[in-house]
Image: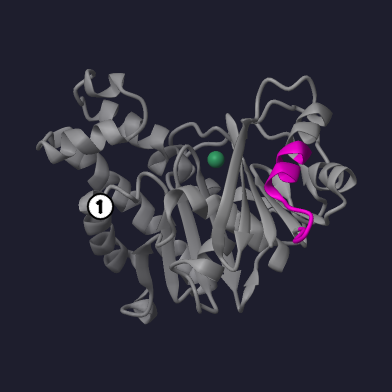
Amino acid sequence: MIIGIDIGGTSTKLGLVDQGKVVARKSLPTTGHASADAFADALADAVGQLTTDNEPPTGIGIGAPNANQLTGIIEMAPNLPWKHDVQLARMLELRTGIPAVLGNDANAAALGEWRYGAGKGCKDLLMVTLGTGVGSGFIVNDQLVLGSHGNAGELGHTTIVIDGRDCTCGRKGCLEAYVSIRGLRQTYSELDGDPEVLKEEGVLCIAKAAQQGDTAALQTFRHAARWLAVGLANAVAVTGPERIVLFGGIARNGELLMAPLRERFRQSLLNIYHGRVDLVASALPDNDAAILGAAALTTL
Ligand SMILES: [Zn+2]
């Protein structure tokens, strides 16, 4: 039994994981706590409610944005309420008496896919999350790549267009600025899409418009496919994965993205990789993927 915790900008979800299945769940708001200590108290409480005395969990895995696995610290995450470094793994260990591991949420998702999902059995895997941001995790030779500072695998912040769009990281032209939800919405707007469509949040509104034949919406997905294909092909040239798993709301819109993406990816790929890299969507149930990934951090 392992506890998996996924810390998001608005809510924190936790689950009790038994042999790759989430068997019990809880959630609490991430915001509204007086301090990081108060949040850790609430989190420890929730962990307590998930566990029973006769079968205590052997570990806690926590996935969070800007979390550094080497230090166990959440480092100034822009989307979390605390603007200082938070030693969350240690804070939770002290409160629960259960060993805790903290890791970057994208890395956790990659581990979840690798251990339990569409990446099962791969020695070399790339997992890319397409959502509010663009996260990625690289498994190379059966190991998650952390790098010497603990924050390797940031495909979303590799430059795809020199002097391109402003990115949330403060640089220009990052892949994230083109294929995240915000990126797709910007593309749709630049293509003179219907402003009414964008009154709805997220990316589902553009997908719905595309399904009704809206030209700008269809173009938006084709453009996203073009940028993403180049980003993925570049990554393949570096680590040579046997499979790429795409996760998140944007990838979930069926063939809208996947069809043009497969085509563009084939064209962008270095010759030696032709026919050798699978491109698939996640096989994990949406609600559980982040919890399973966080739990998988404890298996490293
Ligand atoms: Zn960036």
46 is within the stretch colored magenta: yes
Q: Secondary structure at mark 1?
A: loop
- Residue situated in front as seen by the camera: 276 or 34: 34
The image position of residue 62, as x and y in percent, is: 69, 49
Q: Which quadrant holds the N terminus?
A: bottom right
**Can you tell which quarter of the image residue 168 is in?**
top right
Ligand 1 under 8 Å from disc 1 Cβ = no
Residue 94 placement, left or right of 167:
right
The residue range painted magenta reads 44-56
Name the residue tied to disc 1: 254
Q: Residue furthest left?
A: 213
Query: From the viewer's perspective, is residue 219 above or below residue 295?
Result: above
Residue 117 placement, left or right of 109:
left
The image position of residue 248, as x and y in percent, is: 42, 48
Q: Quadrant of ligand 1?
A: top right
Q: What residue is drawn where x is 20% and y is 26%?
A: 193
275 is within the stretch colored magenta: no
Q: What residue is drawn where x is 32% and y is 78%?
A: 274
Specify how the rendered protein is coloured: one colour
- Residue situated in front as seen by the camera: 189 or 132: 132
Q: Which quadrant holds the C terminus?
A: bottom right
Query: From the viewer's perspective, is residue 167 above or below residue 246?
Result: above
Query: From the viewer's perspective, is residue 78 above or below residue 173?
Result: above
Label 1: few (<14), some (14–19) or many (≥20) C-alpha neighbours in 10 Å: few
Q: Is residue 113 visible?
A: yes
Residue 273 placement, left or right of 159:
left
Residue 74 placement, left or right of 112:
right
The image position of residue 28, as x and y in percent, is: 63, 32
Q: Residue furthest front?
A: 54
Q: Is residue 153 visible?
A: no
Q: What residue is drawn where x is 85% and y is 41%?
A: 91
Query: From the viewer's perspective, is residue 176 above or below residue 282?
Result: above
